[in-house]
Image: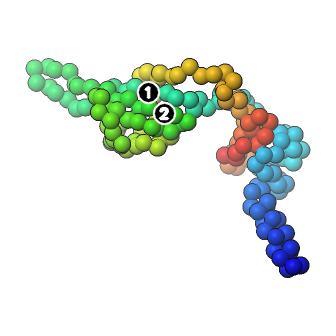
């Protein structure tokens, strides 16, 4: 029984230490979920601090007009194709090109975008959309603002806080 207790204790210790990370300025440990005060106490004052707009993960429909090659007969302009990308929870749920639903496409600069991709991936492939249609969002469900601490170490380290707790390290 004593051996089993030791194993449980060791696994708990390893699980907590696996989530720990070092401060950007010293060897103090911080973990995801630590408060801003705890991080400041452990790591010191950041070199820069700014508020980030919250990510809008609500339902959205992005519209692009993609040029599909040249048609130079009699001075005709290039044709364009209407591509719509629907998102929910920050992920692609539908791609439509001229009213035809697609699971994936390379219409944006020959870079594949597919159902399940993130909004960042679509922006990287297609650029900014011409139109963004968003559903009405309930203010009670709005995302809280994020706060970013920047430490000018080499490389620069960003600590992102949500609701006063450490969310991620970049």
- Circle 1 residue: 62
Q: Where residue 78 sits: x, y (%)? A: 22, 25
* Res. 163 visible in picture: yes
Marks 2,1: beta carbons within 8 A = yes
Q: Answer with left or right where residue 101 lies relative to residue 86.
A: left
Q: Answer with left or right where residue 52 lies relative to residue 38.
A: left
Count of numbered circles on the image:
2
Query: Above or below — where is 137 with respect to 18?
Result: above
What is the quadrant of residue 7 in the picture?
Answer: bottom right
* Secondary structure category for the residue under label 2: strand
Crowding at mark 2 (Cα within 10 Å: few <14, some 14-19, many 20+): many
Query: Above or below — where is 146 with respect to 104?
Result: above
- Circle 2 residue: 87
Q: Residue at x 38, y 29 (%)?
A: 84
Q: Nearer the viewer, mark 2 or mark 1?
A: 2
Which quarter of the figure is the N terminus placed in? bottom right
Q: Where residue 93 sits: x, y (%)? A: 45, 37
Q: Residue at x 76, y 62 (%)?
A: 15
Q: Which numbered tag is attached to residue 41?
A: none
* Secondary structure category for the residue under label 1: strand
Q: Residue at x 47, y 43 (%)?
A: 117
Front residue of this view, candidates 49 and 32:
32
């Amino acid at each position: 029984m004593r051996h089993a207790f030791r194993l449980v204790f060791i696994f708990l210790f390893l699980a907590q230490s696996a989530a720990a990370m070092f401060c950007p300025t010293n060897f103090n440990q911080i973990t995801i979920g630590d408060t801003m005060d705890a991080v400041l106490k452990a790591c010191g004052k950041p070199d820069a601090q700014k508020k980030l707009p919250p990510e809008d993960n609500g339902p959205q429909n992005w519209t692009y007009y993609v040029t599909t090659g040249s048609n130079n007969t009699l001075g005709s302009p290039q044709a364009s194709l209407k591509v719509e990308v629907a998102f929910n929870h920050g992920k692609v749920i539908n791609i439509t090109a001229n009213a035809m639903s697609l699971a994936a496409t390379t219409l944006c600069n020959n870079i594949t975008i597919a159902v399940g991709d993130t909004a960042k991936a679509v922006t990287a492939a297609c650029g900014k959309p011409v139109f963004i249609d968003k559903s009405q969002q309930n203010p009670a469900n709005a995302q809280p603002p994020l706060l970013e601490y920047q430490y000018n170490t080499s490389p620069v380290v960003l600590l992102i806080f949500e609701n006063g707790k450490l969310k991620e390290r970049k």
